[in-house]
Amino acid sequence: MAEESLRTTFMFLLVAFLVIFVTASVIAGTRERGTNLVSGDVVNVKSERIIRVPNSTQPLPNTEEGSIVLWTKPPIKIFDQFVSDRDYIIFFSSTNVPGVRIVYNLKTHRFEAGTPLMSSPEINIFDETPHQLVYVFKKGENQALLLDGAQVNESKFKPLEIMKATGFAIADVSATETEIEGAEVVVYDRYMTEDMMKKI
């Protein structure tokens, strides 16, 4: 009888330990995902923590392929009194190809773009150096990120289904619209190669 009771207690403690371990892992994973990009993620973030550049939400001229070029030219000035509490700046978000966007993560200092989501290397856009970020995509083929003339990330382009168009695809509508000095975005209706980019 004592042996049965001991076995029951042991099983109870083992199950309790597993529950606590799994719960802690989920919490840690959630915190980690808040700062580190996981390839393929749809970004879900509270709209009050996002800054949206005026006129950044617009349709692409070609839904089959395109290139979005962002120039940051110092000094970068963000006219938002709460900028230290913000997580992202939305520089571009397509209204007709869900998930196609360029955002800058103010916490990790990385650009994030595309679908599935890709990330650039760490870069400080406030470092008094001009930078160029290019996002290119072609349906049925690839998408790529180029930073200062060099390709830094590439993956198969997988458009989001409308039902999965959450996160920025919806949140940017209610995000804080703020003037940002020193940034310019130009959209092209074709997939531009590295050689083509050098000519613009």
Image (tube, grey):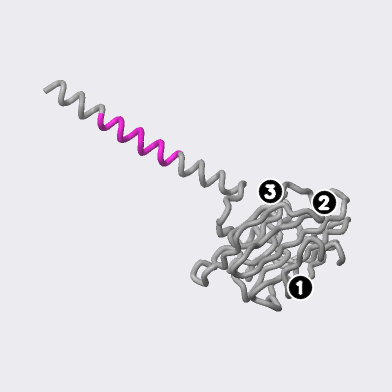
Q: Which residue is mark 2?
A: 126
Residue 153: horizontal and vertical position, in percent? 68, 53
Question: Which tag is nearer the camera, tag 1 or tag 2?
Answer: 1
Answer with the quarter of the image where residue 134 lies: bottom right
Q: Is residue 18 magenta?
A: yes
Q: Reply above or below: 7 against 15.
A: above
Q: Reply above or below: 122 against 56.
A: above
Answer with the quarter of the image where residue 131 lies: bottom right
Q: Which residue is mark 3?
A: 107
Q: Residue at x 87, y 55 (%)?
A: 130
3 or 1: tag closer to the N-terminus: 3
Task: Give the CA separation, mark 3 to mark 2.
Answer: 13 Å
Question: Which tag is nearer the camera, tag 3 or tag 1?
Answer: 1
Quadrant of the image containing the N terminus: top left
- The residue positioned farthest toward the top in the image shown: 2
Disc 1 element: strand
Task: Give the CA separation, mark 1 to mark 2.
Answer: 26 Å
Within 10 Å of the Cα at label 1, are there few (<14), some (14-19), or many (20+) other Cα atoms?
some
Q: Residue at x 48, y 43 (%)?
A: 27
Within 10 Å of the Cα at label 3, are there few (<14), some (14-19), or many (20+) other Cα atoms?
some
Residue 167: horizontal and vertical position, in percent? 57, 63
Are the residues at dot 3 and dot 1 in contact (C-beta closer than 8 Å)? no
1 or 2: tag closer to the N-terminus: 2
Disc 1 residue type (three-letter)? Tyr
Quadrant of the image containing the C terminus: bottom right
Q: Which residue is mark 1?
A: 188
Disc 3 element: loop
Q: Residue at x 57, y 64 (%)?
A: 158
Camera-side residue of 79 and 184: 184
Q: Magenta span: helix, strand or loop, mainly? A: helix
* Magenta stretch bounds: 11-24
Disc 2 element: loop
